[in-house]
Amino acid sequence: MTQKSAVRLGIFAGLVLLLTTACSHQPAIDEVIKKGSGGVNSAEQQAKPYLVLISLDGFRWDYMDRYPTPNMDRIAAKGSKAERLLPVFPTLTFPNHFSIATGLYPTHHGLVANRFPDPSRDMWFSLGERETVEDPQFYAGEPIWVTAETQGMVSASFYWVGSEAAVMGVSPSHWRSYDKSVTGETRVDQVLTWLAEPEPVRPHLITLYFEDVDDNSHWYGPDSKENIEAIKRVDAYIGRLLNGLQTLPHAQQVNIILLSDHGQASYKDNPEPFILSDHAGLEKTMIIEGGSYLFLHFDQENPKRASHIVETVNQHWQHGRAYLPGDTPEHWQVGDNPRYPDVILIPKAGFAVLSTAEKSSYLSKGDHGWAPDDPDMHGFFVASGPNITPGISLGPIRSVDVHPLMLGILGLNAPDNTDGDAGSLARILGSGENCAPGSNFSSGLYKCYPPVIWFPDRKNQNQ
């Protein structure tokens, strides 16, 4: 029996439970501190710039052009802006945030969905279960805060996928367990407090996350008045941050990257959703219901069954397609990671798929999860600061290419493995010419550093 068969049998025998306990499986604090920075910057790292990485979950690529975002516009006006940010497959929150953090596709970093099995341990991961979210064994690759900490640079996270687990035995020096009831103002004020710390302990890498736009576009739709208000609200958070930064004596050393994990779209009124149970039996199947996608995990490996379902679905479905993982489009980068589903069903953008008609409650006013090719699934990217060349408009950029840019800004040595292309964003990475001349530079308040030398063609071969 293979590992994947074992975990499936365990699941369907009731041996695998998704727990709601809040207990943590972090390494001992002493172990984390020993491997990380210990909360103190090395002398070399104290001289580096600062980077605040901000995610606006579900903020579509065209929102800045369609709705008032005066504070985000302030960042774009002084920096660089991409036409859009291309997400990884699947276009879901956990896979995309961790791809940004690691520069890896999901097949390499392991978060292949928001829910998935880990055949090697007879366990399931779920974004809503604290025990699994905090379990470092679900995460592969090296997130940027681990890179920073292990090179003697203090990092902090007010939410980011993976920051709640001690990946490679290392946590950010400062991190928070996700709690959406914490206000945006509180999050921003904590970031400003971190940036006001004395230089030896001041974090140089900070992540910040807001879910307002994703929530409201799900509940009310991408073009609803409620979502427009959410866009205004997160823009105000950004304004609060920018205004607070201006009070810091080292404000000119702070870089900001503002982006999103994916976009958002509405369902079409017609036709009705494709109902899988009308065409295939669903016995002994673990179904991950998405509305904009459907993932099937069988209780045991059965290639013939998987192929039969794919063939049957594709004969009857006009507005979508079923795939075996190995037959997905090449640019989706779905590898042979055993955590992927046995069958993947993806509708055309705006259309829906359900396992049974009774699952219609899974459909919301707005959604994501459709193919990353669809423009409505694309996110946004703007950046500014002393290490960002201003005035450059980029075309579409890949989310995995943000990682080497961040390493360049912070002057960190790159991990051995990456799917990101350092050359992709190299032209917006300042190499010193943006440094202010005169007293600021000589007094040490404003320092710029050249980009890290990378090997753009290096690819991650780990599975």
Image (cartoon, grey):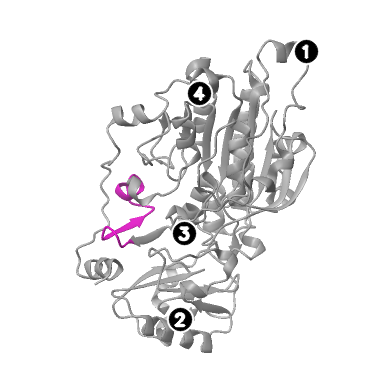
In this rendering, the answer to whether 425 lies above or below 435 is below
Q: Specify few, some or many for label 2: CA neighbours under 10 Å numbering under 14, 14-19, or 20 or more.
A: some
Mark closest to the chain's N terminus, 2 or 4: 4
Which of discs 3 and 2 lies nearer the camera? The answer is: 3
Q: Is residue 119 magenta?
A: yes
Element class at badge 2: strand
Q: Which residue is mark 3?
A: 107
Task: Give residue 411's position: percent from left, percent from top.
Answer: 59, 31
Element class at badge 4: helix
Mark closest to the chain's N terminus, 1 or 3: 3
Instruction: Identify the amino acid type marked 4.
Output: Trp
- Tell me the number on the disc at residue 438: 1
Mark closest to the chain's N terminus, 4 or 1: 4
In this rendering, the answer to whether 365 lies above or below 283 is above
Mark closest to the chain's N terminus, 3 or 2: 3
Image side of residue 380 versus residue 56, left or right: right
Residue found 51% across the figure and 25% down from its top:
203
Q: Which range of residues does the magenta coloring cover?
A: 118-134
Residue found 53% across the figure and 16% down from its top:
199
- Tell me the number on the disc at residue 194: 4
